Image (cartoon, grey):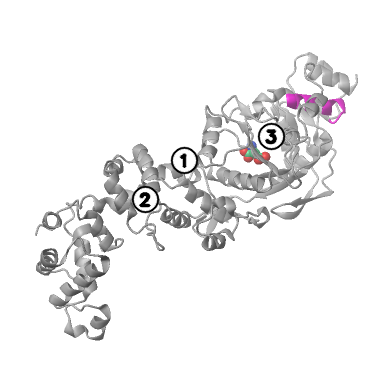
Amino acid sequence: METRELANLIFPEVKDISYYEEKYKMRDLPEGAVVTRFAPSPTGFVHIGGLYQSLVAKKQASQTGGVFFLRVEDTDQKREVENGVVGIINALKDYGIEPDEGMIDEENFVGEYGPYKQSMRKEIYQAYAKSLLEKGLAYPCFCTSEELDQIRSNQEKAKERTGYYGKWTKCRNMPIDMMAEKIQNGERYIIRLKSPGNPEKKIKHKDVIKGGVDMPENDQDIVIIKSDGLPTYHFAHSVDDHLMGTNLVIRGDEWLPSVPLHLQLFYMLGFKAPKYAHIAPLMKTEAEGKRKLSKRKDPEAAVSYYKEEGIPKQSVKEYLMNIANSNFEMWRKQNPDKALEEFAFDLKKMGVSGALFDMTKMLDVSKNVISKYTAAEIYEEAYAWAEEYDAELCELLKNKEYSMKVLGIERGNSKPRKDIAKWSDLKETIRYMYQLDKENTNFEYQKITDQEEIQKIVTLYFEKYYDENDDKQTWFDKMKDLAQALGYAREVKEYKANPENYKGHVGDISTVIRVTLTGRCQTPDLYEIMQVIRKRRNFEKNIEESNGI
Ligand code: GLU
């Protein structure tokens, strides 16, 4: 029997590969256009690292006038969960990282190179596996798991590399007739690649991110089609990325060691290999060292975490871009108002080793991002978040007109407030603008703590000095007048020069007013705060209530 007949026996129904080669035309794109993809497995968990990869891939494609597509890699059906595909699609959509082509729900896709879900492409892989079988470049393997265990233990005993290769293979050189007979007898089998590699020889790989990496050639007769008829990741990768016209594979660097195998597969299938860019994982510091951000241990590894915490998408994207290209931070400083899309991202500038993913830094970036929001933008996003996650905040924000004023404090000027990093912080940041914490009568008054003195300051201020129609300068001058009237210095400088002459200074006085009104000694601009709450609140009544004066 010939290999061709064996191939026919195994895959009698499949089409000739010429059909697919014809069907999926070469992409007609400008010179230098990058065709790349995000190829996750639908495990139900969208890792922040996946978003990071997609952001980078989409940016690379759009910057070059290329294509970014989403391919669902669901050949490991044990790991699959229901709605896993939709979860990924929604996460990308949520973050505005929409693919140009790919699955749009569990079954449907857009684009000329689909289906973009591997379980829907079974016959395509089989056609290519058949072509390898025909040429004698692949073969059926009948080894049982016991036999494979035996091979492994023999290898361990002999202190040799484990795997199915060279002299350890059992089925590689089995006569074709015997193979055919076993198949006809209904024996279970898988299809393996007949690797021509020699590990004594090195392949020279030039990675777009990692640079030159030399690795031994692959000699493992890896499985290409499993017993369920579906391909392995390796085989599907070469077939799909060939037919889909990918010219740059951007993926996690856990796949770097597979490059020799992948190049071999492309070569054996007669395909032009794509370029590869292997991205280092996001890391977290722990104790002395660093480790990968873990799905199990770190809540921030899940894309859903950011939504739950109310961290704006823009903040997450900005921070990820910060990690991707270290010059982004400087660019952002120089171009505070430009859209992220305008940044000239450079794949080559990505770090070779694991990038630190630091939540504190992320929140700092977010404070900056939010500082540029208008009050209306904050209101809209925060309200939508609160509706889902925080009933109390939702209640506060219900009074839209007033809330817009609250959110407008120290905003829209050249030095906007930067104290909000996420919507889940917002309630605490603005609550005092709605109600004082009545339980807490123990405010930190800082320097002036004597209750009688406090009462005197507050009463006098509201009786004689405060006028809601004053402009900021007049308002502050009056605060100084009050200070002076009560034996405090009008200016901090004066006080510092002669502390023995004063009870304190104007700052101590304004702190008393600030704390009385807000319960805090750190707030945004007090004048603005008073402008906002003046109409809503009878100050003196509030003071009485909160201080028991
Ligand atoms: N399905 C693979 C993964 O989940 C994709 C790797 C690739 O992008 O080729 O890691």
Q: Which residue is mark 3?
A: 233
What kind of element bears circle 2?
A: helix
What kind of element bears circle 1?
A: helix
Q: Amino acid at mark 3?
A: Tyr
Image point 53% across, 37% down: which residue? 93
Looking at the rendered image, the disc whose residue lies closer to the viewer, 2 or 1, is: 2
Q: Position of residue 76 (x, y in %)?
A: 63, 30
Q: Position of residue 269 (x, y in %)?
A: 82, 34
Foreground residue, 81 or 425? 425
Looking at the rendered image, the disc whose residue lies closer to the viewer, 3 or 2, is: 2
Callout 2 environment at 10 Å: few (<14), some (14 to 19), or many (20+)? many
Q: Which badge, 1 or 3, comes first in the chain's sequence?
A: 3
Q: Which badge, 3 or 2, comes first in the chain's sequence?
A: 3
Foreground residue, 482 or 177? 482
Distance from Cα at disc 1 to Cα at disc 3: 26 Å
Q: Which residue is mark 2?
A: 375
Q: Quadrant of residue 197?
A: top right
Q: Amino acid at mark 1?
A: Ser
Looking at the rendered image, the disc whose residue lies closer to the viewer, 1 or 3, is: 1
Q: Quadrant of the N terminus?
A: top right
Q: Quadrant of the C terminus?
A: bottom left
Q: Is mark 3 within 8 Å of ligand 1?
A: yes
Image point 17% across, 63% down: which residue? 467
Residue 443 visible (yes or no): no
Mark drawn on residue 304? 1
Looking at the rendering, the stretch of residues picked out in magenta corresponds to: 124-137
What kind of element bears circle 3?
A: helix
Q: Which badge, 2 or 1, comes first in the chain's sequence?
A: 1
